[in-house]
Amino acid sequence: MKRPDDEAGYVEVADEPLHEQIFADEHCRAYCATLAPGQATRYHRHSEDTFYIVLKGGWMNTTNLSGYRRCPMIFSRSFSMIKILSLALQTVFTGSAYLPKGLSFFMPTKKRPSIHMAMASSHNLSEVILLGIELR
């Protein structure tokens, strides 16, 4: 039996097993992405502008599907430039970044979809949980 991502190389985010839908209507769709230490998602595509809130933090890594660039993360004005720089440097030098509980950010993927795989570090003490709210 073929998996949905066999030919395309990815699934839509709504079909990614670790992104559990908790609400949907014509205006938005909300889901929880939960990754245990060392657990990785399948390659999946985000094609709606999405607001994220980290409900339970930890170290995360993302790998883009070949040919796709990382979508920018837009932070609130209250998130200091030093913290943004710290996240960027962590990613550049270690390949992963620590997402603290309560962090929120916006990813504008409607005009330029993002296809990636996310992985929680095996060194995390517990699962990482992000709440995603897609704006339709």
Image (cartoon, rainbow, N blue to C red):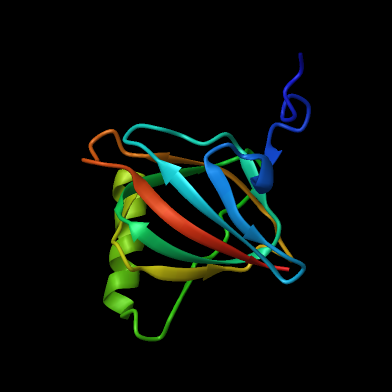
Q: Quadrant of the C terminus?
A: bottom right
Q: Is residue 66 left or right of residue 76?
A: right
Residue at 70 percent across and 31 percent down: it is 9
Q: In the image shown, does 78 or 15 lie closer to the viewer?
A: 15
Residue at (52%, 40%) from the top-left corner?
A: 18
Q: Position of residue 59 (x, y in %)?
A: 30, 48
Image coordinates for residue 60, horizontal then vertical, percent: 36, 47
Please identify the residue farthest to the top as the structure is shown: 1
Q: Is residue 8 left or right of residue 90?
A: right
Residue lying at the far bottom of the rendered structure: 77
Viewport quadrant of the N terminus? top right
Q: Which of 111/41 is in front?
A: 41
At a point 63% along the width and 42% down the height, the residue shown is 44
User: Is residue 64 or residue 75 the one in the foreground?
Assistant: 75
Q: Is residue 12 above or below residue 56?
A: above
Residue 86 to residue 122: above or below? below
In this image, 76 relative to 135: left or right?
left
Q: Is residue 128 above or below residue 48?
A: above
- Which of the 4 image quadrants contains residue 17? top right
Residue 123, image x, y percentages: 23, 36
**x, y (%) of residue 22?**
57, 55
Res. 120 image quadrant: top left
Q: Does residue 135 appear left or right of residue 85 in this picture?
A: right
